[in-house]
């Protein structure tokens, strides 16, 4: 787990996890994966829907290009 976001309206949280490959390096396609943890219900995990990913809880990861020289 990298971090979590808790809401004030209920006990559900969005958990942000690092996605690793077999060798222990970050997955370049999706290094951070957010998922709901439904603590107000039964604790199950749910994927974020499109609007949640696009407008509220999603992550935009970009490669940092370091200038040489």
Image (spheres, rainbow, N blue to C red):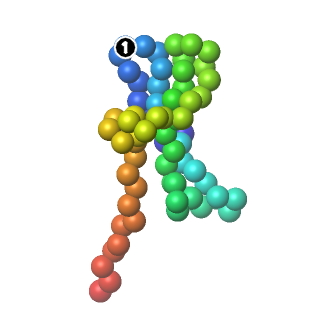
- For the residue pair 3 and 11, the one nearer the viewer reads as 11
Give the residue drawn at x 52%, y 62%: 28
Residue at 54 percent of width and 48 percent of height = 18
Q: Looking at the picture, does residue 45 appear above or below residue 53?
A: above
Label 1 residue SS = loop
The picture places residue 19, in percent across and down from the top left corner, at: 57, 50
Image quadrant where residue 20 sits = bottom right
Q: Where residue 37 sits: x, y (%)?
A: 54, 26
Viewer-proximal residue among 58 and 7: 58
In the image, taking residue 43 as reference, residue 49 lies left or right, namely left
The residue tagged 1 is 9
The image quadrant where one finds the C terminus is: bottom left
The picture places residue 46, in percent across and down from the top left corner, at 56, 30
Q: Is residue 39 above or below residue 63?
A: above
Q: Is residue 45 visible?
A: yes
Residue 3 in view here: no
């Amino acid at each position: 787990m990298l971090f979590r976001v808790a809401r004030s309206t209920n006990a559900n949280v969005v958990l942000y996890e690092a996605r690793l490959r077999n060798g222990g390096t970050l997955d370049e396609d999706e290094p951070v994966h957010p998922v709901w943890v439904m603590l107000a219900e039964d604790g199950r995990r749910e994927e974020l829907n499109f609007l949640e990913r696009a407008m509220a809880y999603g992550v935009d990861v970009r490669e940092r290009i370091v200038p040489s020289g």
